[in-house]
Image (spheres, rainbow, N blue to C red):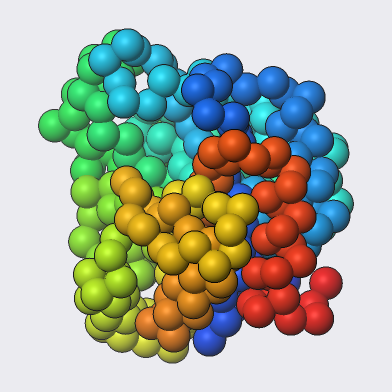
């Protein structure tokens, strides 16, 4: 189901705009070796990001932890954290990157999305993914073989419920069931992004989502992926703007001249080479980059301030 009204949302355009690239940040931002975030520190960093002019804060949904997983971080429940961020920030967009659509009931997701949008004064963008860990599916009573079908079905239910006016598609309905809606009422639909593919084709994503978010790949490969995306948009939503965003890990060196060196899912780099990398991404069609910061030997607040002073002006210009 197409989420048409979201394309007109000014907060969405603050993050995603044709021909431009904006920069956001992934939470939590952790010191090396830290696995359990300090909520007070995360809220302080979020307030700083808001004040310094970053465009978005991205929140992951990691339901369960295991010693067998490569990511040991104890992520907070995304809706609890998004509620706190809505109350603690003023301008920065809040984005789920991504709620696991296949492991939560879609009406619960829709209710939480509407609530977050209301608390943040329409700054929320709903990113949805399907997850990729079979043991989590089993633990939550789901079958990974149903992932693709469940993603499409749940997307349709969420999209109907977070439109204006809201429409509830029930799992089951008795003959005397009332017609439900979700409150508070929205003036515009909550924008919906596909984070990863969710087992769907790019044509399906282009028809149904406001944009597509992927992990970092080497520049040539990323340009190829963007072209595949543009081709899909041309076939399936030729008159619409559809965003393309990338999650990029960055270990920012204190040496501004340090050249970029590849690390898993990103780069160890000085700020000058980072600007060049981001300029290349903008030229190849990326609209937004979510930085997953690593702070080897540096204070995270110092990294944010350096990025705000030396990197953001090349992309955000004089816009507030």
Q: Nearer the viewer, residue 125 or 175?
A: 125
On the question of residue 247 being in view, the answer is no
Q: Is residue 163 above or below residue 74?
A: below
Residue in the image at 40% along x and 15% along y: 65
Using residue 37 as the reference point, say whether residue 119 is left or right of it: right
On the question of residue 135 being in view, the answer is yes
| Residue ranking furthest to the left | 145
Residue in the image at 57% along x and 17% along y: 36
Residue in the image at 76% along x and 55% along y: 305
Residue in the image at 19% along x and 29% along y: 144
Q: Can you give x and y, in whole percent of width and height, for residue 173 in the image?
A: 44, 29
Q: Quadrant of residue 110?
A: top right
Q: Can you give x and y, in whole percent of width and height, for residue 42 in the image?
A: 71, 32
Q: Nearer the viewer, residue 22 or 270?
A: 270
Query: How many numbered marks appear?
Result: 0
Q: Nearer the viewer, residue 65 or 152?
A: 65
Using residue 147 as the reference point, say whether residue 170 is left or right of it: right
Q: Can you give x and y, in whole percent of width and height, for residue 30 in the image?
A: 59, 31
Q: Can you give x and y, in whole percent of width and height, for residue 103 in the image?
A: 37, 27
Quadrant of the rendering where the C terminus is positioned: bottom right
Q: Is residue 181 above or below residue 278?
A: above
Q: Is residue 120 above or below residue 16?
A: above
Quadrant of the rendering where the N terminus is positioned: bottom left
């Amino acid at each position: 189901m197409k989420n048409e009204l979201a394309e007109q949302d000014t907060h969405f355009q603050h993050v995603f705009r044709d021909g431009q690239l904006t920069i956001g940040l992934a939470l939590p931002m952790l010191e090396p070796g830290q696995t359990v975030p300090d909520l007070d520190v995360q809220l302080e960093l979020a307030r700083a990001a808001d004040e310094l002019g970053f465009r978005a804060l991205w929140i992951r949904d990691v339901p369960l932890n295991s010693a067998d997983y490569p990511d040991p971080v104890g992520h907070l429940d995304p809706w609890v954290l998004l509620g706190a961020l809505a109350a603690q920030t003023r301008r920065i967009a809040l984005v789920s990157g991504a709620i696991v659509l296949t492991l939560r009931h879609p009406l619960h997701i829709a209710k939480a999305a509407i609530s977050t949008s209301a608390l943040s004064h329409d700054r929320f963008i709903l990113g949805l993914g399907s997850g990729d860990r079979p043991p989590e599916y089993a633990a939550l009573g789901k079958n990974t073989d149903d992932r693709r079908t469940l993603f499409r079905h749940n997307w349709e239910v969420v999209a109907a419920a977070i439109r204006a006016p809201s429409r509830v598609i029930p799992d089951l309905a008795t003959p005397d069931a009332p017609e439900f809606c979700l409150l508070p009422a929205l003036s515009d639909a909550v924008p919906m992004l596909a984070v990863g593919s969710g087992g769907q084709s790019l044509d399906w994503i282009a028809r149904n989502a406001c944009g597509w978010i992927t992990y970092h790949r080497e520049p040539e490969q990323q340009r190829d992926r963007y072209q595949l995306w543009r081709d899909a948009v041309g076939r399936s939503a030729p008159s619409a703007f559809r965003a393309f965003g990338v999650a990029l890990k960055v270990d920012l060196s204190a040496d501004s001249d340090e050249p970029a060196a590849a690390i898993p899912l990103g780069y160890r780099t000085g700020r000058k080479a980072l600007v060049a990398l981001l300029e290349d991404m903008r030229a190849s069609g990326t609209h937004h980059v979510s930085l997953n910061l690593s702070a080897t030997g540096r204070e995270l607040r110092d990294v944010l301030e350096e990025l705000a002073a030396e990197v953001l002006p090349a992309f955000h210009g004089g816009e507030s």
